[in-house]
Amino acid sequence: MPLRRTVAAAFALAVLGPIAPAHAAPPPSAPKLDIEELPRPARPDERKETAYDPNSVLVRFKRGASAAAKDKALTGRGARSASAVAGTGYVKVRTQGAATDMLRELRRDPAVESVSLDYRRHLTAVPNDPGYAYGDQNYLNTIRLPQAWDRTKGSATQVIAVVDTGVDVNHPDLKGRTVPGYNAVTPGAAPTDSEGHGTMVAGIAAANTHNGVGVAGAAWTGRIMPIKVFGPGGTAFDSDIAEGIIWAADRGAKIINLSLGGPGTSSTLHDAVKYATSKGAVVVVAAGNEGDDTPQYPAAYPEVLAVGATDTAGALTDFSSWGDWIDVAAPGFGIVSTGPGNQYYIGSGTSFAAPLVSGVAALVRTAYPSLTPAQVIARLKDTARDAGPRGIDPYYGNGVIDAFHAVGGAWAAEFPQRAAGAAEPNDVPARAIAFTTSITGTSAMEGDVDWYRYESDREKTVTFRVTPPAYNDTWAQNSDPILEVYDKELRLIGRADSPNVTAQETVTAMLAAGRYYVAVRNYNGAPDTRPYTLAVFGDFSAGPSPAGEQTWVWDVSPADFASGVARGAAPAVRFQRIVDPASVTADTVRLVHGRTGATVAATPAFDAATRTVVLTPEAALQDNTPYRIVVDGVRDTDGAAQAERFRTTFRTVDEAPSPVGNPRATGGVGTATLSWTTPAISDLDQVIVRMAVGLTPPSSPTSGTAVYAGTGSSVTVSGLNARNAYAFGVWVRDRSGNLSAAASARLIGSKVLINGGATTITRGQAAVVTAKVVRGDKLVAITNVPVQLYVRTKGSTTWTLVTTVTTNRYGNVAHTHKPSSSVDYKWVFRDSTAYIGAESAVRAVTVS
């Protein structure tokens, strides 16, 4: 599953337009909210250079730099300070020359701490609300938002800053939901919406819900802070975006939504994001609509939550950008929301997936108000539902957001992994499928690469052609094949990748007699189950085409997307190139845990003769757990370094979990505390504890009396009859429903029999207080256990510990005590690993 790197281009992150005016809830006969679908994002027709202000840079001077030094840094280079970027510490500097030249010059100036180009970013494109009630918002069920609302509807204190094109605060579905905002483009002016994008984002995040109008917002009772950073045309500069972020953070925004982005990183923008996080804001960013793995900013910054887009079924859309910087995904296809002028829009883009997540983040912050921004992000990631390749992956990150689980509800099953094509596995050259004239395949799994082999009987010129499935604008997953042709040594001889998603991809090559390999991969990350066709035709005499770059990996085991892999497996990679043995290390060839992203402790052993490295894990792999084999940074014997990371995903066999370790029962007075060690499994559902009276534990997790079901490691049961024996059964259940063998623990009942004695003594006389501790069932003495004697003044409710005495071989205890006034005594037997504790009856002694 190699990742594809391409030259970046500026992009539009959403396509919008007016649909219909707002209106009250329709009568039951009305089928749905009156909406009209607009064009969705498409792959850019061509790549362009990253856009920025050609005559400006953003400069931050070093602390303590003098005014003279600052002036010299600028005027000496024909530049001038145009304006301060409020709240950032940067100033916008204008020059008559090229911004890139000024950037290079100022980086060398001793008075300058940081300087960057001013990049231009683009837009990423059970209530009674009609849009929800009539099915226009079914995608809310994908993230289980209605169930989440049953636990929390958010809070008016959860302010979501929409850093965007502005917001129509007078829209019927937004009226009363906004707080004062800011216009960074024209300070002092109202942050009115010039494009419609910001109003739509605001409605998705927090439209008035259960008001009988329009659509339901994710945050239900949240508030919107409109921050306008885009001017006409749908573009914004980093200087304005950074200013808007800082303004929102300084005024208490709890969540900051950035449905914008572009390639190219900026210290100005990154510093603003880090500042907002330090002020307590969760920053949620749309991943972008490039459809490839070019990093988009600010989504790729580590402090933010980057959101990809899916359809209602939880499948990645073909426009959603992807890469290791993706954190989660959410619906972003056919999203309905508010628009300027009392209208409603429907659109697609990661722009509209992000505000859904922002709204859920507001619910999480309401349910768990003490969480830091990093902890909120961690919770949203940890509770997401796995989708696509198992475990953390570059398409969905940790998975599709699960609002209900995030606010404390029960987990839901993973989205099912899609079935592989009929020819799978053909993920590496070693498993290439032979073909002669034509063959069909699919890109049915995210990141799938299909390998084929073709035998040339003589020198000839042929054309290899891939015909993609028919493009369907209403279909969220349209594959866009890339075609690569290799010689028998796996050296690239031709590659085709047209930006026209409807075009056939063709490579014409002059072949010699012998074997050739063809690879077909998808430009975007979307799973398309419809078949493509690979064909070869032509037959002309010619010499062979020159060979180019050689691929690195010939074979890998287990195969990509394999399941049911044994826990004792030792993954292996066989290289096509002659690899420098010194470059094959635990850092360059790794086994990675698919759920945590941590490298698994494993020893690589490389055999230069077979070009094969075997990874032997130090411990057995966890069951039903995704893992990744990652090859990154090896070198060949000519010194060439691997430029593109290679990885595959597999999942281990689903076995019954191991039982809990160290089951222990500790008795108290009428109580029992059970503790255990939960086995280290990645798919734990719950530990189940059941109880039965007597010494025989329950036979199944449905028999006896329920004591506990959860993910903790202890439980205390109260209200027990101290005279009875109790037996406990403990089971581990995983998310597939598999049960471990039972573990058990027992406690025997007890009685403390306080003996009679003098009921009246004279002042200064001692009372002898005795008792016997016996089993509750057989009245057999319990020996060598501590028993506590308590006393209280007659008429008082406060007991005071007098002493602790250990029972003798007959179970007896005795203590002589000289009370100063009339008192009550009792003996208490507690905290035993074998018995339920008990108390004696009260013995009253009157002092006369």
Image: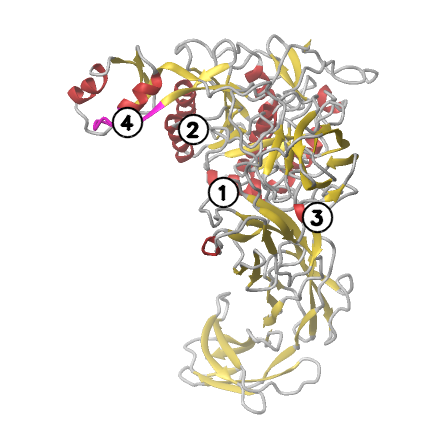
Tag 3: amino acid: Arg
Which numbered circle lies on residue 431?
3
Neighbour class for label 4 at 10 Å: few (<14), some, many (≥20)? some
Mark 3 in CB contact with mark 1 (< 8 angstroms): no
Neighbour class for label 1 at 10 Å: few (<14), some, many (≥20)? some
Tag 1: amino acid: Gln
Query: Could one spot residue 532 in this view of the protein?
Result: yes
Residue 524 placed where, x, y %? 63, 31
Residue 725 placed where, x, y %? 69, 75
Which residue in the structure is indicated by mark 1? 375
| Separation (CA) of disc 4 from disc 2 | 16 Å
Mark 4 or mark 1, earlier in chain: 4
Mark 4 in CB contact with mark 2 (< 8 angstroms): no
Which numbered circle lies on residue 107?
4
- Colour mapping: secondary structure
Mark 4 or mark 2, earlier in chain: 4
Neighbour class for label 2 at 10 Å: few (<14), some, many (≥20)? some
Determine the secondary structure under disc 1: helix
Q: Which picture quadrant has residue 84?
A: top left
Q: Which picture quadrant has residue 442?
A: top right
| Separation (CA) of disc 3 from disc 1 | 43 Å
Tag 4: amino acid: Arg
Q: Is residue 470 above or below residue 378?
A: above
- Residue that protrudes farthest toward the bottom in the picture: 809
Answer with left or right where residue 73 lies relative to residue 749: left
